Image: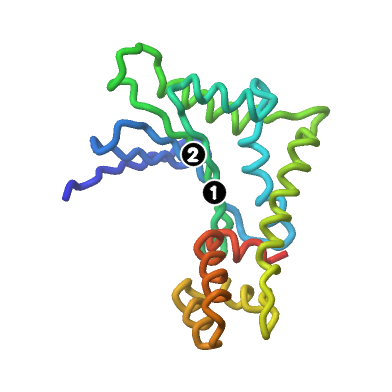
Amino acid sequence: MAVISESVKAMNGYKLHVVKTEKYKTNTLVWKMKAPLEKSTVTLRSLLPHVLQSSSSSYPSTGKLRAYLDELYGATLFVDLAKKGEYHVITISVEIANEKFLSDPTPLLKKAFQFLAEILTKPNVHEGAFDEGTVEKEKGRLNSEFNQFTMIKCAIPISGLFRKCAKMSRMHCMCMARKMMWTISLLKDFMNIISRHWHRMSLIYML
């Protein structure tokens, strides 16, 4: 098994981690922002990465932003939220083809850094506020995810079970459902939700 080499360098306000490997033909840039997990900010922080990835100053619509990514040999932009201990971690990533495997001399890695900087520092704002349409769309998406956790009906309130699960491991959560002797159909729905939304569940249930 190949040993992965990682170097860490302290920069101005952040730490730069560089991981070198010959295993892939793409380069991936990952930006993480960590803050204490607090009830007063968890909803806003849950919205933030999705608003940022929808549009920016140079690409004021999702369509234009995605079209630009397509021009970069199908580069991808994705975001994630996670609870790590008592911290809320926002992750924004860009994955792009490694130009050394292409005949095109376009400096793709440089463009990926420029694009990530654009997403982080030049959002789509009007008069000092995020674009209202984008915010409303992402609020609707977040609310829809929340509603998925309360749709399943059973003998005990499902939302109460999710609150318990947020403090437990995924395996313990599933074992609890089995001990409750749920029907196969209900157990399947529950496990699917756990698998799809585990990384968000403990954040949403702080609301």
- Please report the residue visible at 70 percent of the width from the left and 69 percent of the height from the top: 150
Q: From the top left corner, tell me how far across and down residue 31 is, in percent.
A: 50, 40
Q: From the top left corner, tell me how far across and down residue 28 is, in percent.
A: 40, 35
Quarter assignment of residue 125 = top right
Q: Disc 1 vs disc 2: Cβ atoms closer than 8 Å?
A: yes
Seen in the picture, residue 121 relative to 170 is either above or below; the reply is above
Seen in the picture, residue 49 relative to 94 is either above or below; the reply is below
Q: Earlier in the sequence, mark 1 or mark 2?
A: 1
Mark 1 is surrounded, within 10 Å at the Cα level, by few (under 14), some (14 to 19) or many (20 or more) other residues, namely: some
Q: Which residue is mark 2?
A: 93
Front residue of this view, candidates 92 and 138: 138
> Which residue type carries mark 2?
Ser
- Label drawn at residue 80: 1
Q: CA distance from mark 1 to mark 2?
A: 9 Å
The kind of secondary structure element at disc 2 is strand
- Please report the residue visible at 67 percent of the width from the left and 39 percent of the height from the top: 51
- Label drawn at residue 110: none
Front residue of this view, candidates 179 and 121: 179
- Please report the residue visible at 40 percent of the width from the left and 13 percent of the height from the top: 106
- Please report the residue visible at 75 percent of the width from the left and 49 percent of the height from the top: 140
Q: How is the image coloured?
A: rainbow
The kind of secondary structure element at disc 1 is strand
Which corner quadrant holds the C terminus?
A: bottom right
